[in-house]
Amino acid sequence: MNERILDLFTKDALETARANNTYRSMRLMESPESSCVKIRSANGVLQEQILLASNSYLDLANIPELKQAMANAVLEWGTGSGGARLTTGNKAPHQELEETIAKFKDTESAITFNTGYMANVGTISALCGKGDYIFSDTLNHASIIDGIRLSRANCKVYRHNDIADLERVIKEAKAEHATQSAASSDTRPFRGLIVTDAVFSMDGDLADLPVLLRVAHEQDALLMIDEAHATGVVGKTGRGLAEHYGCAHADVTVGTLSKAVAAEGGFVAGSKKLTEFLKNKARSFIFTTAMAPAVAAAANANLKYIDAHPERVQKLQDNVKYFCDTLRSAGFQIPPTASAIVPIIIGDEARALEISAALQKRGILIPAIRYPTVARGQARLRASLMATHTQEQLQTAAAAIAQAVKEGV
Ligand SMILES: Cc1ncc(COP(=O)(O)O)c(C=O)c1O
């Protein structure tokens, strides 16, 4: 190992991260993901914590019948898939999962990827290329941003959830395209893709799907939404934004199987034409080994469980309402939310960290989110709720948050 050369690549970045308090390290969780978890404190004692930081919104990871479904699939299909989907990796659990997703999302077809990250990167870079335009909400997830970069398309970022600004950048792009076409022999039509998170992961607010559908229709653009934090959470039975608003689907709906579905993988739901195109063009689908069949079987069983248990989605939504109401009664300004993400804005980065650490000492695990994940001075506690939190746990957490914030820790 040539440490000196490695330092040329790594030293500055690591030193800057340390100096800016943005150096990242991993916490070891010593129990399975659930509404109550165990972690070790600095002095080595194993501590119970109420978990307000999980993406496993429906808390499905430990349900005996679902664990058994995955175990059975390991026994039937082995530990790995052995090949890409287009070579030898495509097994019955993969196809069954895609059928279940299409049914759950009420679309003609669905295709799975190994992660939601790969679904976004592969889909955007397959659909768009040089000369195309992508219109992206300023708060979109990193996997959307990376897909845009990989596509080499022109990117126009619009202000968060600001439809007037979206229309402004589309107009600007169309004018640019017309000028360039006139100055060259390029006769390719204008191609534009509007892409947005469905639920914004640091704020918990929703994209306005009905309005975005209207703009996409008026502007002849394609619309893609990422339902990573919406699937299993938003809408009466957890089907996402189309169910929540009672409107049509976007042309392209991306999602993950790793959050409320509590397995692993990503998906795209839409028309058969779209999924056939992605099978042929999405490099993160083509050039990678298929997910293990048992992972596909687990996602399939969990998604069917969500379908059969809408009361679990309802319980999650009731918990969100209860928690927000409790925080409001304690004097916090919490905007209404239809997602399971509740940001409690603190502002100062160091203070948010202190409050989060103080809460952990009181048995409540809730992360402080700071720059660069959110804008400077917008540091926050980001609470994410689960269907299995009890009202008593939520009451305890809200009281501890109020005390920590008001007493200045
Ligand atoms: C909005 C959004 N999209 C995509 C992803 C990626 O999904 P996955 O974890 O399955 O890669 C995440 C989070 O991880 C996310 O928050």
Image (cartoon, rainbow, N blue to C red):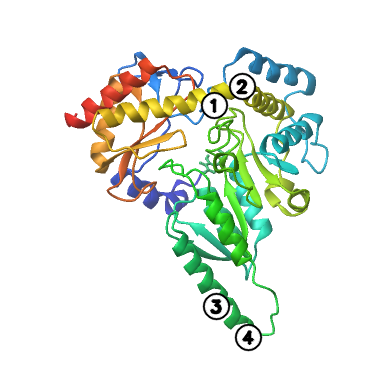
Q: Is residue 376 above or below residue 341?
A: below
Q: Is residue 373 above or below residue 164?
A: above
Taking the image in four quarters, ligand 1 sits in the one at top right
| Residue furthest front as drawn | 246
Specify whether residue 287 is in view: no
Residue indicated by mark 2: 309
Q: Position of residue 336 (x, y in %)?
A: 39, 38
Residue indicated by mark 1: 313
In the rendered structure, which disc, 4 or 1, sits on the residue that comes first in sequence?
A: 4
Residue indicated by mark 3: 175
Q: Position of residue 266 (x, y in %)?
A: 63, 39
Residue at image coords 61%, 21%: 309
Q: Secondary structure at mark 3?
A: helix
Residue at image coords 64%, 17%: 67
Which quadrant of the view contains residue 134?
bottom right
Mark 2 lies within 8 Å of ligand 1 (Cβ measured): no
Q: Secondary structure at mark 1?
A: helix
Label 4 Cα crowd, 10 Å radius (few <14 / some 14-19 / many 20+) = few
Report, in whole angstroms, how far the alpha carbon at label 4 lies from the one at label 1: 53 Å
Residue at image coords 47%, 52%: 5
Q: Nearer the viewer, mark 4 or mark 1?
A: 1
User: Could you tell me the amino acid type at mark 3?
Assistant: Ala
Report, in whole angstroms, how far the alpha carbon at label 3 lies from the one at label 1: 45 Å
Q: Which mark is residue 182?
A: 4
Residue at image coords 80%, 36%: 90
Label 2 Cα crowd, 10 Å radius (few <14 / some 14-19 / many 20+) = few
User: Could you tell me the amino acid type at mark 4?
Assistant: Ala
Label 3 Cα crowd, 10 Å radius (few <14 / some 14-19 / many 20+) = few
User: Could you tell me the amino acid type at mark 1?
Assistant: Val
Q: Position of residue 258 (x, y in %)?
A: 58, 33
* Quadrant in which the C terminus appears: top left
